[in-house]
Amino acid sequence: MPKKDSRNTKMKIVNAAWELFYKNGYDSTTVEDVVDESGTSRGSFYHYFNSKEELLSTLSSLFDSKYEELQEALPEEMSGFEKLMYLNKELFIMIENRIPIDLLAKLYSSQLTLKGDRTLLDHNRIYYKLLRRIVIESQEKGEFRSDVSVNEIVKAYALCERAIISDWCLCNGEYSLSRYSETLFPILFGGFLK
């Protein structure tokens, strides 16, 4: 199977699973439900995942899929900071509308205790590649400070996002994630602007 078809099949399963988790809850969603919703087969499911539990770690893939979609829609005339704020807002709106808080909290807690790969910290993800590209372009245009490395700025951005998401989970979603971030993020991240 060509690599692109393979990636599409896996993402169909991931997208269907998270859609069902949101609508029906994690515990009420079965592997069979995911297979039916994704239009794939049990064989395909078990080719990519050993169990339904493994789908929890695919949340970063769902985020990256959203970033792939968003990067194509980024207006060139936006400053680097505006691009970062746009990406953050759109991702957080998606999280509010598609990701159950309890599952998001499970993913974050699993990343703290996991001994293997921590998918949220994988710098080969589209997320980190896109952030690095935006920061490099912004430094070249003189928008971001040049005395701070690209990696430090990207790390700070990711840290701010994770902190806001963690707090939102701790508060059980009692406020709008996207609106709170829109207010707080410029304060937390503004020190990197020239």
Image: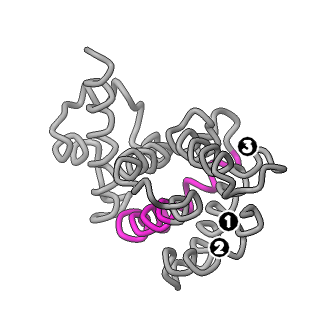
- Please identify the quarter of the rendering in which residue 186 is found: bottom right
Gap in angstroms between the C-alphas marked 3 and 2: 19 Å
Asked whether the residues under the numbered discs 1 and 3 touch, taking CB atoms below 8 Å apart as contact, a structural biologist would say no
Q: Earlier in the sequence, mark 2 or mark 1?
A: 1
What stretch of residues is rendered in magenta? 86-113
User: Secondary structure under badge 1?
Assistant: helix
Residue 183 in the figure: left or right of residue 52: right
- Please identify the quarter of the rendering in which residue 2 is found: top left
Front in this rendered view, residue 144 or 125: 144
Q: Amino acid at mark 3?
A: Asn
The answer to if 98 sits in the magenta stretch is yes
User: Secondary structure under badge 2?
Assistant: helix
- Labels 1, 3: front one: 3
What residue did someone put label 2 on? 186
Residue 151: mark: 3
Q: How many residues crowd mark 2 within 10 Å: few (<14), some (14–19), many (20+)?
A: some
The main secondary structure of the magenta stretch is helix
* The residue positioned farthest toward the top in the image shown: 1
User: Secondary structure under badge 3?
Assistant: helix
